[in-house]
Amino acid sequence: MMNSSHAATSINGSASSTNAAAGQSQGLKTYFKTPEGRYKLRYEKTHPSSLLPYALAKSITQITLANLKDQPVPHADLHPSSSYSASSGVRFVASRFLGGGSSNGGRVLSFVGGTGTSKSNGGISRSSSTGGLNGCNSAVNSNCDGKGTYLIFNVGDSLFISELKSQDKDPVKAINFSTSNPVCHAFDSEAKDGHDLLIGLNSGDVYSVSLRQQLQDVGKKLVGAQHYNKDGSINNSRCTSITWIPERDGAFVVAHADGNLYVYEKSRDGTGDTSFPVIKDQSQFSVAHARSSKSNPIARWHICQGSINGIAFANDGKYLATVGRDGYLRVFDYLNEQLICGGKSYYGALLCCAWSSDGKYILTGGEDDLVQVWSMEDRKVVAWGEGHNSWVSGVAFDSYWSQPTSEDIPENVVYRFGSVGQDTQLLLWDLAMDEIVVPLRRCPPGGSPTFSTGSQSSHWDSVVPVGTLQPAPSMRDIPKLSPLVAHRVHSEPLSGLIFAPESILTACRDGHVKIWMRPGHCDSQASNSEALLSSVVKEKTLLSTKVGSSGYK
């Protein structure tokens, strides 16, 4: 019999060679270097291979991470739920290696089958084989009550759910929308009534559902959903972005392609009058409140002419940033419903925006191929980054990164952020405050900072009044950033970027997601996987020995 160390080597070697082969076939590396170490490609997720190619063009893939917390199993006779985390892939491979499970590794996928219903006896399977990417070994997915992190992504007319730390590429759940396509989604780990997942469609319809309930159901349709803006009754333009409002349980906002943004409360049934006054001036920001206390949505914000392409709240929920087709970033005091500041791109539309965790800075990216950094204190652009060769489609601050400390290096505040674009590249940047803020503080009273040319910068002279939308400043007046890392991570244009505690996630527009492990985490996960596999092999050996002994007796 193969020993555990040899088995672990074979399994890890096979997985590594598979990833390497896939990367090399497209001329892509499976790692990239940073000053703190190597980021290594650990997992890949994608849609089922049966998905027809024409479906990929229906929508652009967006990604959401969802962390489900512990919840007791409701029925004592069911197997306890499992959280596989980093070792789920090894359990899956080990089950096949040891002969356990069915021909597909004991995996039960809810999107398999003509009708999406279970064909097992009584609809419940009590198989004891190890399998299921999310630790669910029942045909009714009854064991999905454990904690775990899930990846949610949309492709065509379907929403797919995968366990983040599983070696298997295929999703564990698919939800089909027959008449429309999901285009945006958001998750709230602190939701109190179970409805923690929001889904916006290109028809304008919006749903709130329980992610756990979707995982437990074997069908391919939403279950237990609350439906808003049904059939586009309030706004029939495409949903472009959706997000929960921080610090306000059950409240969320939905942005649409016609420049309007709606505020909802999921606790309201929406039986009241849902009509809003006609917008008199499409070029002006305005807010209208619902006429009835039972209405849902409760408010409409008219932001701009043309599409709102992205929205993001600061962590405390006080400020809301939007970017649009007209090329403007707008920052609002959400509680007071007031425009605070904003400004225009150098060219074309802005496509994405993101806040720093402390709420001091905002990133934007768009069709000018640039990344801009806005300061909330100055209400101005304080830096711009050049490095992409095409539109910037996603930006994010890395709140889990911490800068190296040394007694020889003077203390300096550095923000790490990333961007992805249609040039298939991931760029990482460092924003050092001594390069941005210090020049401003060195100004003489009443003066303005000077640069290498010796000319004064009018960009820094004036104080920007509240509510002012500024034109794009001259590039020579703004400090320029260069990327720390530029790495081609996919063969198709990129559409999404997420920083997680142990990894970086990148997604391309046709539904392929890659998980890049941070330096140090990949090796520790491999060690845990080998230890798990070793224990499984030992248990199997013990069991075989006992069975053999009893047979001879």
Image (cartoon, grey):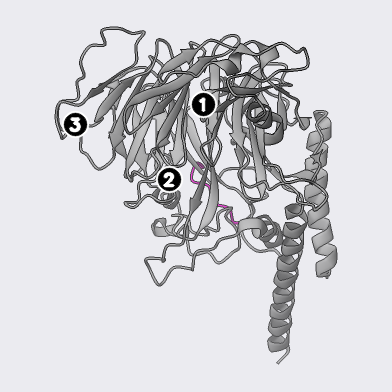
Question: In front: mark 1 or mark 2?
Answer: 2
Q: Residue at the location (48% across, 35% down)?
A: 159
Where is residue 538 shown, x and y percent of the image? Answer: 74, 75
Q: Is residue 56 above or below residue 540?
A: above
The answer to which of 33 and 166 lies nearer the viewer is 33
Say few, some or many: other residues with alpha carbon within 10 Å of mark 2 (under 14 / 14 to 19 / 20 or more): many
Q: Quadrant of the N terminus?
A: bottom right
Query: Residue 296's x, y, as percent?
Result: 23, 32
Q: Is residue 450 magenta?
A: no
- As drawn, the residue found furthest toward the front would be 445
Q: Secondary structure at mark 2?
A: loop
In the displayed structure, 239 sits above or below 133; it is above
- Indicate the quadrant where residue 151 lies: top right
Give the Cα distance between marks 1 and 2.
24 Å
Q: Nearer the viewer, mark 1 or mark 3?
A: 3
Tell me whether the residue at label 1 lies in contact with that at label 2, contact meaning CB atoms closer than 8 angstroms: no
Span colored in magenta: 106-112
Q: Is residue 509 visible?
A: no
Left or right: 267 with respect to 41? left
Q: Give the residue pinned by disc 1.
A: 156
- Mark 3 secondary-structure assignment: loop
Circle 1 SS class: loop
Disc sitting over residue 188 in the figure: 2
Looking at the picture, which amino acid does disc 1 mark? Answer: Gly
Instruction: Answer yes or no: is residue 29 visible.
Output: yes
Residue hosting label 3: 295
Residue 524 bears which disc, if any?
none
Q: Split into 4 quadrants, where in the image is the C terminus?
A: bottom right
